[in-house]
Amino acid sequence: MKHLWQPPKLRVSEEDGEERHATWLELFYDLVFVVVIAQLAHHLKDHPSAAGFTEFAVVFVPVWWSWVGTTFYATRFDTDDTLHRVLTVIQMSAIAAMAVNIHKGMDYASVGFALSYVIVRGILVIQYLVAGQHIAIARPLTNRYAKGFGLAAAIWALSTLVSIPWRFGMWCLGMVIDFATPIGAGKLHGQIAPHASHLPERFGLFTLIVLGESIVAVVGGLAAQKWEFAAIVAGVLGLCIAASVWWVYFDNLDGSAIRSARLGQVGTYQIWLYAHLPLVASLTAMGVGMQKLLSGNMSAALPDENRWLLCLALAICYAALGFIHLSTDAGSLRRSQTQALERFSAAILLSLIAWLGWNLSPLTLMFLLAAICISQVVLAHFGMHHIKPEEIGE
């Protein structure tokens, strides 16, 4: 039987060598984001234009930040008592309300979306205030978080009292404060850096959620087609693209960025963290692009907006992977830099295809994209087996 309430305790020590894994509560919490990501993807599918992508991005950021906030609190202070579980379920309910309001989140549903976000962040502020009262060493960081996140939540709450487009201006101001609060914490991150095995696993699980949307997209796109050769091959290529991204990302998922923060290299840790935002947003958009391609006319040139959506989503994905590689230990500094260069090169090639591939058929486009993605796996595999002993630690 769980305790009704336990004082928060610091859970970042790794002196005993113990690995931490996601709790059942954290996995349950992630389920609501499966729904939110699906709703975001559905909205982008209905609005694949530049304006639609902008709306998608504006709404995606607070959704991802909601997950990040709860995850970082849990990795440092989670006690898994009854009260913590209840608060988590309340946050899940508010996030579900965000999902309900996504389709009109830039219109009349923006009030509901904003209030849902305020509830999620308000609970987080309370949790940090309580943690600071019981853990003296964490108090400088928790007080900073409580003040910054509290101010941002207040701005979001006040935004419901003003009209559009001023409301969205206040959202942007609130998000700037939200992001600036941890960015400006400096060496405080290193003093109580998150657990080096628990946090990467949590980010990996969220990445799996958005990659799952790509699988759903391939299946959904094929379900709308007759079982013709071109559609089947394009579907297989779509799975190859998703698998390639999974391969490259998870082969480099470790806690080295967090260990860098403990050594005072906070910038490396923050690059790793914030590069995940464009990564997961672009993976969601990539799934939408693949579904639109696979469900369309396979014998005609792909519409420009669909080509741009798919190619640029993949380009952003690989650019984000490049920054993640720069902040991750790949066996040597030289190897990390080489991996980053390979991912940036892929991003440039994908952008060129978006720009120049105006007359490509869907199948030809998928061949080109899959070839680039698979080549990244080959390069990664080749590079990992050719690290010279003298390069280790460079």
Image (cartoon, rainbow, N blue to C red):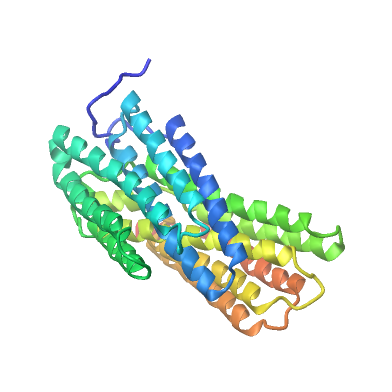
Q: On screen, 14 above or below 291?
A: above
In this rendering, would 195 be left or right of 241? Answer: left
* In the foreground, 260 or 279: 279
* x then y, percent, for residue 329: 40, 55
Instruction: Report whether residue 305 is seen.
Output: yes
Q: Quadrant of residue 290?
A: bottom right
Q: Quadrant of the C terminus?
A: bottom left
Please give the count of numbered marks on the rendered protein.
0
Residue 216 vs 184, above or below: the answer is above
Which of the pair 197/202 is nearer the observer? 202
Residue found at x 46% / y 59%: 105
Asked whether residue 381 is in view, the answer is no
Task: Determine whether 260 is above or below 230 in the image.
Answer: above
Q: Residue at x 35, y 18 (%)?
A: 2
Quadrant (top left/top right/bottom left/bottom right) for the N terminus = top left
Judge by depth and name the residue closer to the eye, 47 or 250.
Answer: 47
The residue positioned 45% from the left and 46% from the top of the image is 97
Residue 121 in picture, x, y percent from top left: 31, 47
Position of residue 61 measured from the top left corner of the image (x, y, whole percent): 41, 59
* 275 sits to left or right of 47: left
Task: From the viewer's perspective, tell me whether residue 291 is left or right of residue 137.
Answer: right
Q: Estimate the x, y position of residue 60 in percent, counting from the top left.
A: 45, 59
Can you name the residue that lies furthest to the top here? 1
Residue at 38 percent across and 48 percent down: it is 116
